Image: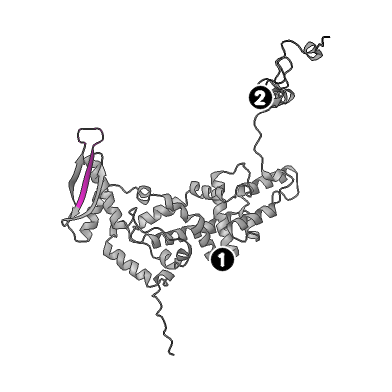
Amino acid sequence: MFYICTASILRPVDQPQMNDAKSFGTSMRYPTQAGGFSRWDVKTRRAFFNLRREVGPEPLRHRDIWPNWNYEAELYAFGQRLGENTTGPAFRLAFIHESYARQEIERRKQLQIEDAHQMVFADQGALRDAGADIVQHYISAICRFNLPYLPEEGIETLTKYLLKTDVLANVSRHIGTSDLIQCAELPPYETTLADTLLAVIGALAEESGTTRAQHFVLDFLVTSLLDVDIDELWGLKNPMSVVADILQREGRAEPETRLLRRAGDATPEAIFLIGVYSDKKLIGQSFGETLLIAEEMAARETLRNFFRTTPSRKPMVFGKQARAVNVPVWSNTPNLRLADWTEVDCKGLLDSRLTQEPLLEQQQPPKKAQISSS
């Protein structure tokens, strides 16, 4: 008696076997998957993709359009992230830009609200001006404290750099003010972000005091100077003549340049080492691709030695030591101008400042051990 397997009769000849690992679930005649997705899923995703291409990208919308938006909670969280108390009315005013006030007045005029023409909305203008004044005075003071030998022109350059719109906007964006600003544009402009940061500093001074605002500037704004080359930022022109003027005022001999090293003269990668001498003493040296470039770089290196701005200088102080600085002493007495700069005068000015500066913890004399009499 012969037995016939009905499964072999009902199965199509060209259908692969189910025990074939490579073709399991991907039948040639009856496919059920494609690329790891079901057939209906692939078609649905393709339809959604084409629809998104036709409609365009999702428009940029503010977070306040969503039902879970809570401005009070966001403002409180903003202060907790920064370690400040931002629940006062001044902080709410600091985030109201003048463009939002104008937009709100125009909206009420269109709605024909009575007395819309006479409405006056408070904005961040006064707080912004107060914050800018605090930032300018404190940055000048802390830069003079860290760089007492740098001429006043260099201090002014550093202050202007930290007050630039892009620097302020970068700090404002990274501390999370973009979602809290009430303005007419979205996303906020660079100028709007910068104005809001200054207004936040002004509000902090009004709510918690000027000292607290200065500490905020130290922690979030002055730290931007850590990755800045002071000499490149200043961009002093004709450095050799400046060196000659300083030596003349100090009663020293004129600067002399000498070739110390040279290599690869006949190659595209030639290099020269020039040294600057005065009274037979080496006061600066640097390399360069040509003799002229090496001489200019040596003069700039000499000025770095004079102004104490070399890469090996003492780093800027922050934290507890910087917060103990007597700000009025350093903000009211500027550094020497470049036309009057001498090392002796700088030391005298520094000594007069330090006499008014309280001794920091690192400068306190060691306490003598008391011997108990037994």
Report if residue 120 is visible in the image: no
Quadrant (top left, top right, bottom left, bottom right) of the N terminus: top right
As rendered, which of 86 and 246 lies closer to the eye? 86
Say if 35 sits above or below 298 in the image. Answer: above
As rendered, which of 149 and 81 lies closer to the eye? 81
Residue 273 within the magenta-colored segment of the rendering:
yes
Residue 196 within the magenta-colored segment of the rendering:
no
Which residue was labeled with disc 1?
A: 209
Q: How many callouts does the rendering have?
A: 2
As rendered, which of 180 and 242 lies closer to the eye? 180
Which residue was labeled with disc 2?
A: 35
Residue range of the region highlighted in magenta in the rendering: 264-276
Picture coordinates of residue 154 (x, y %)? 36, 54
Residue type indicated by callout 1: Gly
Q: What residue is rendered at 41% in x and 80% in y? A: 369
Picture coordinates of residue 196 (x, y %)? 57, 52
Q: What residue is rendered at 75% in x and 44% in y? A: 112
Report if residue 40 is visible in the image: yes
Picture coordinates of residue 21 (x, y %)? 67, 22
Q: Earlier in the sequence, mark 2 or mark 1?
A: 2
Picture coordinates of residue 122 (x, y %)? 64, 55
Q: Secondary structure at mark 2?
A: loop
